[in-house]
Image (spheres, rainbow, N blue to C red):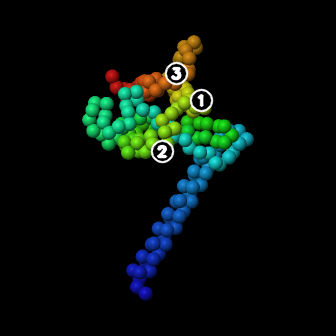
Amino acid sequence: MNLKFIASIISIIGVIVIVAFWCFMDRLKKRIARRCRRKNCGRTDVKRVGKILLPPDESISWRSPEGKRRWFIRRPIKLTFAVCKCGWVELVKIDTDPISVWHSLYVKKYKPEQYNLDEWRFIEATERKLRQLYLGSGRRSDLDPQASDTPPISLQSLFEDYWNEISEVIEID
């Protein structure tokens, strides 16, 4: 046998072992991360539920609000919730990356519930997370005690609060 052939066999086996170990660790991480955090529950069958919020002037079409052709919808807010069978719901991710029009049309046809944020438990989880994000920093410690710490849950207020926070971080005038 050739020494190069033996080295290539060993390297292939090494790559397979590394990929298998990485897959095992990724699966283990997901199993731990997707555990219900409600006290005395500890289930590992937590599901992820996605919701998509579009700005008021956006629609799911191949044309932008300005009338130009497009491949992506650039201003959605994608919310990802963790939901357990025991009733626990938590907003785990807020994403503002663009989504493709193909994906939007697929979701509209086969999973239209993703565009509806009507269930009270999802709205409540969103309010909790926004309150935590909004009041969690030290800059908000001098708020008026009479002020409400719960932002109204509407698409317009979500966008306004989000862009206000972004402009403070980036310091855009």
The residue labelled by disc 3 is 152
Quadrant that contains the C terminus:
top left
Which residue lies under the disc numbered 2?
A: 110
Residue 132 shows in this picture? no
Residue at horizontal 52%, vertical 21%? 152
Tell me which amino acid carries mark 3: Pro
Please give the residue where the numbered disc 1 appears in the rendered image: 120
Residue 119: quarter of image: top right
- Going by the numbered disc 2, the residue's amino acid type is Tyr
Q: Could you say where residue 167 lies in the image, as x and y percent from the top left? A: 38, 26
Residues under labels 2 and 3: Cα distance? 30 Å
| Residue 21 horizontal/vertical position (percent) | 54, 62
In the image: residue 31, left or right of residue 17 = right
Q: Nearer the viewer, mark 2 or mark 1?
A: 2
- Tags 2 and 3 touching, CB below 8 Å: no
Which mark, by number, is residue 133?
none
Q: Secondary structure at mark 3?
A: loop
Element type at mark 1: helix
Closer to viewer: mark 1 or mark 3? 1
Q: Choose between 21 and 58: the one closer to the eye.
A: 58
In this rendering, the answer to whether 36 lies above or below 118 is below
Mark pair 1, 3: CA separation: 13 Å
Instruction: Kindly check if marks 1 and 3 are in contact, taking CB atoms under 8 A apart as contact.
Output: no
What type is the residue that disc 1 sits on?
A: Trp
